[in-house]
Image: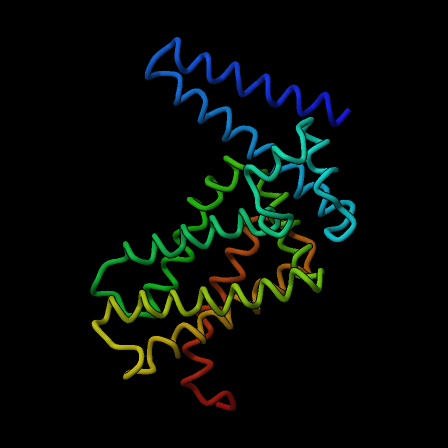
Amino acid sequence: MRTEQRASDSAGSQVEACADTTDGPSRPGLRERKKQRTRDALLRAALELFTTKGYEETTVDEIAEAVDVSQRTFFRYFANKQETAFAVQDMVERRFVEVLRERPADEAPFVALREAVIGAWDAMSRSIEEVVPVELHMRTYRMIESTPSLLAVHLRRSIEMEEEIARVIAEREGLDMDEDPRPRVVVAAFSGVMRATGQLWGAGEDTSVESIRALTESYLDHLGPALAENWRK
């Protein structure tokens, strides 16, 4: 079976190559779309298997077989299983940073962070839906939180993302992070809220985008008063 798949992959590549040379400039676009469809199909299959069977229990061969391609084809698109587990999350994080960079320059740092994450939910939902069902992405988030090996990677990625976001804030404010701690402080507070809401959402029954957006908005709105006010009044 695997030999047949490899032969099929090779034949498909030859057909694409011939089409590219015969139809001229328009074919590369079609070829790229086919490659994107294959990547998306592999990603959907991987996440579905991870969330139903378990990340550790799923093999690359099973992911490839679900899409009827060879293991070699899988590795053309992804370095390993871990990359597929975080692929959509990486896309979401990239989108958030883009939105943050586009926020008005006169917004205060925390306001820019809040408005970026709240305002980006709809756009991010649409972007996710182009690749995998949003519901599957939400299940994947829960799976990552409950898989020790992935949770460790998730925490490391979060630290790296916090540093990147802090650099964006520092650039917006014209500050040197090595001299002024405020960019890292505000991002640490923001990220703490995001982690807390993500964990609460993950433990709940409503896995909708609307649910996590409302929870995030509520908790972010409580951060300022929680830090500045006397709770006993």
Judge from the rendering whether residue 81 lies leftward or rightward of residue 31; answer left or right: right
At x 57% / y 52%, what residue is drawn?
A: 86
Q: What's the image's color scheme?
A: rainbow
Looking at the picture, how far across and down is residue 148, in whole percent? Answer: 71, 64
Judge from the rendering whether residue 81 lies leftward or rightward of residue 76; answer left or right: right
Judge by depth and name the residue closer to the eye, 42 or 122. 42
Looking at the picture, how far across and down is residue 110, in whole percent? Answer: 35, 70
Residue sticking out furthest to the top: 22
Q: Quadrant of the N terminus?
A: top right
What is the quadrant of residue 151 in the picture?
bottom right
At x 41% / y 72%, what residue is drawn?
A: 187
Number of marks drawn:
0
Q: Is 16 above or below relative to 197?
A: above
Q: Is 10 above or below relative to 96?
A: above
Looking at the picture, how far across and down is residue 11, in whole percent? Answer: 59, 17
Judge from the rendering whether residue 180 lies leftward or rightward of residue 2; answer left or right: left
Looking at the picture, how far across and down is residue 153, in whole percent? Answer: 60, 63
At x 55% / y 34%, what residue is drawn?
A: 39
At x 44% / y 27%, what residue is drawn?
A: 32
